[in-house]
Image (cartoon, rainbow, N blue to C red):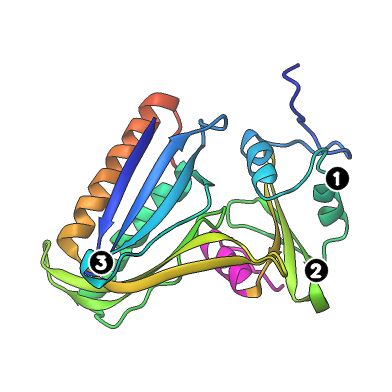
Amino acid sequence: MDGKIHTTPKGRRLTRHARESLIRHEFQEPFDTVDAIIEQATHVTTQADGAIVYIQRAGRRGRSYHMVIEGADGIVTGMRNLTRHELNNLGRNYRFDPHP
Amino acid sequence: MVQKYVLETEGYRICFALQETQAAKESAEVVVELILDRNLGDVAVQSVPTLMTVRDLSRLVAYFEEHIARLQQRPDSESYVFVPLELGFQVQALAGEVQAGDDGEFSVRFFVNVGESSTASHRVYIGGEAVVTLKNLRVFLASLHEALAAWSRAHGVSPV
């Protein structure tokens, strides 16, 4: 073993990219917040490449969004406190409907 | 090793500094710096380090190439806001005048993610808008093409 966490506490696989990006986005190991966003998602949608996008309304007065993307190889990334504008930009770039 | 890729506009320079990371196969760490033209003031703003995937780099090249093609037909075209997956920067290609070949120019808006606000942890972006000539854009795109080819040779990862 390399000492790195390869899955979330609920057993969802993390890609190498996710292991690095989640830390940068201030998710703390063991990444239980990733499981929480997926399980408490207010919208679930799909990117054009088939990856699943979990979106959870959050923050002050529910005006920001947490997001986790899960592809065929596992969790790709996660971000917290996205503004509606950022979420819309990601939707446009990665071709998913941010407000299904 | 840090590799730098520079986009020169008529008002500012954008410098992408890419460095390999542990997740090197599909992504590199990028710091994007916006440096104002010296004649306009002594201002430089650097993004927080974020990851940029090889796919994002390839998408950025395609974004500009598609915008140039569109402007030849419709000079008032404004492209959508390009963002990489990790939101290290935002760029939007705007209206301009483009003829065949390398003759032309258009406006480009560029914002870098400088970190999170202390109140609500929302990302804060600082940026500018200026004209970029097709000639300078082509130089930048050629350097990105070379970066993609080198990435593919080193890691066997193609930007699908």
Whether residue A76 is visible to the viewer of this picture, yes or no, is no
- The answer to whether the residue labelled 3 contacts the one labelled 1, judged by CB atoms less than 8 Å apart, is no
Q: Is residue A31 magenta?
A: no
Read off the residue under disc 2.
A58
Q: Which of B149 and A20 is in front in this view?
A: A20
Q: Nearer the viewer, residue B108 or B152?
A: B108
Look at the image and tell me in which quarter the N terminus of chain B lies: top left
Read off the residue under disc 3.
B68
Subunit bearing disc 3: B
- The answer to whether the residue labelled 2 contacts the one labelled 1, judged by CB atoms less than 8 Å apart, is no
- SS category of the residue bearing label 2: strand
Read off the residue under disc 1.
A32
Mark 2 or mark 1, which has the lower sequence index?
A: 1
Q: What stretch is highlighted in magenta?
A: A85-100
Subunit bearing disc 2: A
For this orientation, the residue located farthest to the front is B42
x, y (%) of residue A54? 75, 58
Could you tell me what secondary structure mostly forms the magenta stretch? helix
Residue flagged by tag 3: what amino acid is it?
Ile
x, y (%) of residue B40? 25, 72
